Amino acid sequence: MKDLFQVVRRPLLTEKSTTKKEAFNEVAFEVDRRANRAEVKAAVQTLFKVKVLRVNLIQMPGKKKRVGRKVGRTPDWKKALVRLAPGETIENL
């Protein structure tokens, strides 16, 4: 599909994702909307040098935002929940 750096856009560092990381060894990323499971798995394994067990993809709808009288929308995006093999970690997240 694309370059690996275009498939995985950024890690999602929220309270919920941090809890999942500690409990299930699962890391969350924002990924390209056209990426599939195999591309996300290959990108994470190559970029972070870890073994991936499974990948769950979630379509996240954009939200309505308002500034004064004008109403706009944030773009839709895709979230990937990547479960790592036992003993594997991604250090810089």
Image (cartoon, rainbow, N blue to C red):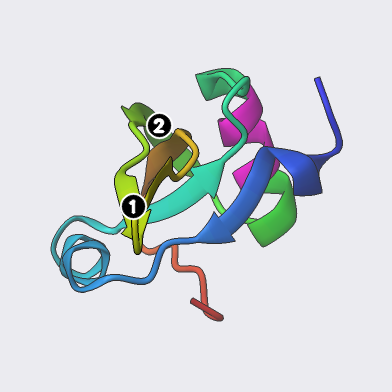
Specify whether residue 31 is painted magenta. no
Image depth: mark 2 or mark 1 in front: 1
Relative height, residue 53 to residue 49 (above, below):
above
Mark seen at residue 65: 1
Per the picture, the main secondary structure of the magenta-coloured stretch is: helix
* Secondary structure under the numbered disc 2 in the rendered image: strand
Which residue is situated farthest in the right direction here? Answer: 3
- 10 Å crowding of disc 2: few (<14), some (14-19), many (20+): some
- The picture quadrant where one finds residue 82 is top left
Specify whether residue 43 is painted magenta. yes
Amino acid type at image mark 2 = Val
Magenta span of residues = 39-44
Name the residue rendered at 59%, 33% in the picture: 40
- The picture quadrant where one finds residue 74 is top left
- The picture quadrant where one finds residue 86 is bottom left
Number of dots carrying numbers: 2
Q: Mark 2 points at which residue?
A: 55
Quadrant of the rendering where the N terminus is positioned:
top right
Is any atom of residue 49 visible in this view? yes
Residue 58: x, y in percent? 33, 29
Amino acid type at image mark 1 = Lys
Classify residue 54 as left or right of residue 24.
right
**28, 49: nearer the viewer:** 28
Residue 53: x, y in percent? 39, 36
Which residue is situated farthest in the front direction here? Answer: 69
* Secondary structure under the numbered disc 1 in the rendered image: strand
Name the residue rendered at 35%, 63% in the picture: 68
- 10 Å crowding of disc 1: few (<14), some (14-19), many (20+): few
Relative height, residue 31 to residue 10 (above, below):
above
**92, 84: nearer the viewer:** 92
Name the residue rendered at 58%, 59% in the picture: 10
